[in-house]
Amino acid sequence: MRFSEHELTAALTGAATSVLARQRGKVRKGQDAAEVWEAMDRYERFKMLDAIGGQVLPVLVALPDVEVAAGARPAYSESEVSQVVAGLVGDDVGRLKRAVLVKTRTALVLLALAHVPLRLDPDALLHGSPEEPEEGGA
Protein backbone atom coordinates (compact mmCIF):
# COMPACT_ATOMS: atom_id res chain seq x y z
CA MET A 1 0.00 0.00 0.00
CA ARG A 2 1.24 3.49 -0.71
CA PHE A 3 0.93 5.77 2.27
CA SER A 4 2.08 9.36 2.36
CA GLU A 5 4.72 10.43 4.86
CA HIS A 6 2.04 12.35 6.77
CA GLU A 7 -0.21 9.27 6.96
CA LEU A 8 2.62 7.06 8.22
CA THR A 9 3.66 9.64 10.80
CA ALA A 10 0.11 10.02 12.07
CA ALA A 11 -0.35 6.24 12.20
CA LEU A 12 2.87 5.68 14.17
CA THR A 13 2.27 8.58 16.53
CA GLY A 14 -1.31 7.47 17.17
CA ALA A 15 -0.22 3.90 17.84
CA ALA A 16 2.58 5.11 20.13
CA THR A 17 0.28 7.29 22.23
CA SER A 18 -2.22 4.42 22.47
CA VAL A 19 0.50 2.02 23.61
CA LEU A 20 1.76 4.65 26.04
CA ALA A 21 -1.74 5.04 27.49
CA ARG A 22 -1.81 1.33 28.31
CA GLN A 23 1.59 1.23 30.03
CA ARG A 24 1.42 1.13 33.77
CA GLY A 25 3.65 3.62 35.50
CA LYS A 26 3.93 5.95 32.49
CA VAL A 27 0.43 7.43 32.52
CA ARG A 28 -1.15 8.11 35.89
CA LYS A 29 -4.85 7.84 36.55
CA GLY A 30 -6.66 10.90 35.20
CA GLN A 31 -3.74 11.89 32.99
CA ASP A 32 -4.10 12.14 29.22
CA ALA A 33 -1.69 10.04 27.14
CA ALA A 34 -1.28 12.90 24.65
CA GLU A 35 -0.07 15.17 27.46
CA VAL A 36 2.41 12.53 28.62
CA TRP A 37 3.57 12.11 25.01
CA GLU A 38 4.21 15.84 24.67
CA ALA A 39 6.00 15.91 28.03
CA MET A 40 8.43 13.18 26.92
CA ASP A 41 11.74 14.40 25.57
CA ARG A 42 12.57 13.87 21.90
CA TYR A 43 14.86 10.90 22.54
CA GLU A 44 12.20 9.04 24.54
CA ARG A 45 9.66 9.63 21.79
CA PHE A 46 12.21 8.51 19.17
CA LYS A 47 12.89 5.25 21.03
CA MET A 48 9.19 4.48 21.22
CA LEU A 49 8.52 5.39 17.57
CA ASP A 50 11.53 3.35 16.48
CA ALA A 51 10.35 0.26 18.36
CA ILE A 52 6.80 0.52 17.07
CA GLY A 53 7.91 1.50 13.56
CA GLY A 54 10.08 -1.60 13.32
CA GLN A 55 7.01 -3.74 13.81
CA VAL A 56 4.37 -1.71 11.97
CA LEU A 57 6.06 -0.12 8.93
CA PRO A 58 7.05 -3.34 7.12
CA VAL A 59 3.47 -4.57 7.43
CA LEU A 60 1.93 -1.30 6.24
CA VAL A 61 4.19 -1.30 3.18
CA ALA A 62 3.40 -4.96 2.41
CA LEU A 63 -0.38 -4.53 2.57
CA PRO A 64 -2.11 -4.87 -0.81
CA ASP A 65 -3.12 -1.73 -2.67
CA VAL A 66 -6.73 -0.69 -2.18
CA GLU A 67 -8.70 2.19 -3.62
CA VAL A 68 -9.26 4.82 -0.97
CA ALA A 69 -11.92 7.41 -1.66
CA ALA A 70 -11.39 11.00 -0.57
CA GLY A 71 -12.61 11.42 3.00
CA ALA A 72 -12.00 7.76 3.90
CA ARG A 73 -9.25 5.68 5.47
CA PRO A 74 -7.69 2.55 3.95
CA ALA A 75 -9.71 -0.43 5.21
CA TYR A 76 -8.29 -3.89 5.80
CA SER A 77 -9.82 -6.83 7.59
CA GLU A 78 -8.08 -8.41 10.54
CA SER A 79 -7.47 -11.56 8.49
CA GLU A 80 -5.79 -9.59 5.67
CA VAL A 81 -3.45 -7.87 8.12
CA SER A 82 -2.83 -11.14 9.97
CA GLN A 83 -1.80 -12.92 6.74
CA VAL A 84 0.71 -10.17 5.91
CA VAL A 85 2.09 -10.21 9.46
CA ALA A 86 2.41 -14.01 9.41
CA GLY A 87 4.35 -13.81 6.16
CA LEU A 88 6.79 -11.31 7.64
CA VAL A 89 7.37 -12.98 11.03
CA GLY A 90 9.51 -15.77 9.64
CA ASP A 91 9.96 -19.39 10.63
CA ASP A 92 12.90 -19.00 13.01
CA VAL A 93 10.68 -18.79 16.12
CA GLY A 94 8.70 -21.47 17.86
CA ARG A 95 5.03 -22.13 17.17
CA LEU A 96 3.74 -20.50 20.35
CA LYS A 97 5.97 -17.43 20.07
CA ARG A 98 5.02 -17.08 16.41
CA ALA A 99 1.30 -17.18 17.28
CA VAL A 100 1.79 -14.51 19.96
CA LEU A 101 3.86 -12.32 17.62
CA VAL A 102 1.28 -12.55 14.83
CA LYS A 103 -1.60 -11.75 17.18
CA THR A 104 0.08 -8.78 18.89
CA ARG A 105 1.53 -7.29 15.70
CA THR A 106 -1.81 -7.62 13.97
CA ALA A 107 -3.45 -5.70 16.82
CA LEU A 108 -0.70 -3.05 16.68
CA VAL A 109 -1.05 -2.61 12.90
CA LEU A 110 -4.85 -2.35 13.17
CA LEU A 111 -4.35 0.28 15.88
CA ALA A 112 -1.99 2.21 13.60
CA LEU A 113 -4.43 1.94 10.68
CA ALA A 114 -7.15 3.42 12.89
CA HIS A 115 -4.97 6.52 13.32
CA VAL A 116 -4.32 7.07 9.61
CA PRO A 117 -5.92 10.43 8.76
CA LEU A 118 -8.72 10.66 6.23
CA ARG A 119 -7.48 10.68 2.64
CA LEU A 120 -7.65 14.13 1.05
CA ASP A 121 -9.01 14.83 -2.40
CA PRO A 122 -5.99 15.74 -4.58
CA ASP A 123 -8.13 17.77 -7.01
CA ALA A 124 -9.41 19.95 -4.18
CA LEU A 125 -5.82 20.58 -3.07
CA LEU A 126 -4.66 21.57 -6.57
CA HIS A 127 -7.67 23.46 -7.85
CA GLY A 128 -9.29 24.73 -4.67
CA SER A 129 -12.53 23.46 -3.25
CA PRO A 130 -15.68 23.85 -5.37
CA GLU A 131 -17.24 26.13 -2.73
CA GLU A 132 -14.53 28.75 -3.23
CA PRO A 133 -15.24 31.22 -6.06
CA GLU A 134 -12.44 31.64 -8.53
CA GLU A 135 -10.78 35.03 -8.69
CA GLY A 136 -11.11 37.19 -11.78
CA GLY A 137 -14.48 35.70 -12.79
CA ALA A 138 -17.09 37.69 -14.77
Image (cartoon, rainbow, N blue to C red):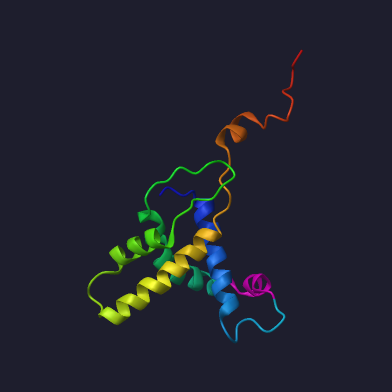
Q: Residue 14 location, x and y as percent?
A: 57, 64
Q: Residue 52 location, x and y as percent?
A: 46, 69
**How many badges with numbers are in the image?**
0
What's the residue at 28%, 63% (across, down)?
87
Question: Is residue 94 one of those drawn in magenta?
Answer: no
Q: Residue 100 location, x and y as percent?
A: 36, 78
Q: Residue 129 location, x and y as percent?
A: 67, 32
Question: Is residue 33 one of those drawn in magenta?
Answer: yes
In the displayed structure image, the side of residue 78 where residue 86 appears, left or right: left
Q: Residue furthest right?
A: 138
What's the residue at 58%, 53% (across, down)?
117
Where does the magenta region start and end? 32-42
Quarter that holds the C terminus: top right
In the displayed structure image, the side of residue 28 where residue 102 appears, left or right: left
In the displayed structure image, the side of residue 61 where residue 25 appears, left or right: right
Q: Residue furthest left?
A: 92
What's the residue at 23%, 72% (across, down)?
91
Asked if 5 appears above or below 104 in the picture, the reply is: above
